[in-house]
Amino acid sequence: MSENYFGEDVAAAYDDDGAMSSDEVLGPTVEFLRRLAGGGAALEFGIGTGRVALPLAQRGVPVHGIDLSEAMLSRMRQKPGAENIRTTIGDFSEARVEGRFQLVYLVFNTIMNVTTQTGQVACFANAAQHLEPGGSFVVEVMVPDLRRLPPGERYVPFDVSDTHVGVDEYDVANQGLVSHHYTNRHHSVPFRYVWPAELDLMARIAGLSLRERWADWHGSPFTGESRTHVSVWERTG
């Protein structure tokens, strides 16, 4: 099972970034996912504090969520509408829940919380096993920012403000990434970064095929300059 880096200290501050929960960010995200659910149920891998699941459920989509962190789920349960969402505590690369879903989704770089290639492959297999035929698996994740690394350097700042400094530390040989966050304390989380083509291969192994890929939830074209992507794979069998 993956190690839980999202204890009470992280959960307590997780929703402090109001921009991530703004209508400007969540509106396109929820509408994109609602469209893919198509009247069916959705399963969120890494549901966390319910940032996406709660407004999606409010749009009429039945949502079940899996998360490793009891602290994060506890925060979600305190929010209006949480009583309508079923949750399971576990590692989303292997935890199973009852039923099949029209949509399984994994947003905001959470696929990288699985820090081995074997675990990420298992995540795709688990998604496929939960999907109805014709159902969709959606992943939102960054494109590795290696072009910003000068030779011999491994640190890339991604956010510098009066209240927060964020620095990504790359381990290129092992495809590793540690995100360091400095506020009034230092918090670091390990990741395994992953390329779009690698995700497509994981999907193929799991019996899924790529249906669409965009640069963002608005449906902007994905290009060589895109910093993130939203990819949709379909269970065809």
Image (spheres, grey):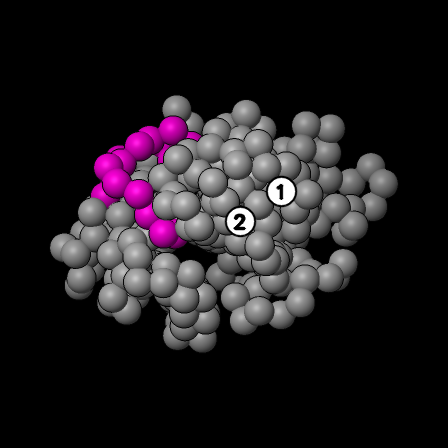
Residue pictured at 26% horizontal, 40% vertical: 99
Asked if residue 30 lies left or right of residue 154, the reply is: left
Residue pictured at 45% horizontal, 66% vertical: 32
In this picture, is 126 found above or below 195? above
The residue labelled by disc 2 is 233
Residue pictured at 57% horizontal, 69% vertical: 219
Stretch of the chain drawn in magenta: 87-103
Residue pictured at 77% horizontal, 51% vertical: 148
The residue carrying pointer 2 sits among few (fewer than 14), some (14 to 19) or many (20 or more) residues within 10 Å by Cα, namely many
Q: Residue placed farthest to the front in the image?
A: 237
Q: Amino acid at mark 1?
A: Asp
The residue labelled by disc 1 is 200
Q: Amino acid at mark 2?
A: Trp
Q: Earlier in the sequence, mark 2 or mark 1?
A: 1
- Quadrant of the rendered image containing residue 31: bottom left
Q: Label 1, secondary structure: give it.
A: helix
Asked if residue 237 lies left or right of residue 76, the reply is: right
Residue 120 visible from this viewpoint: no
- Closer to the camera in the image, 175 or 129: 129
- Quadrant of the rendered image containing residue 37: bottom left
In this picture, is 91 found above or below 23? above
Residue 25, x across and y down, in percent: 45, 69
Marks 2 and 1 close (CB-CB < 8 Å) = yes
Question: Is residue 101 covered in magenta?
Answer: yes
Residue 136, x across and y down, in percent: 45, 51
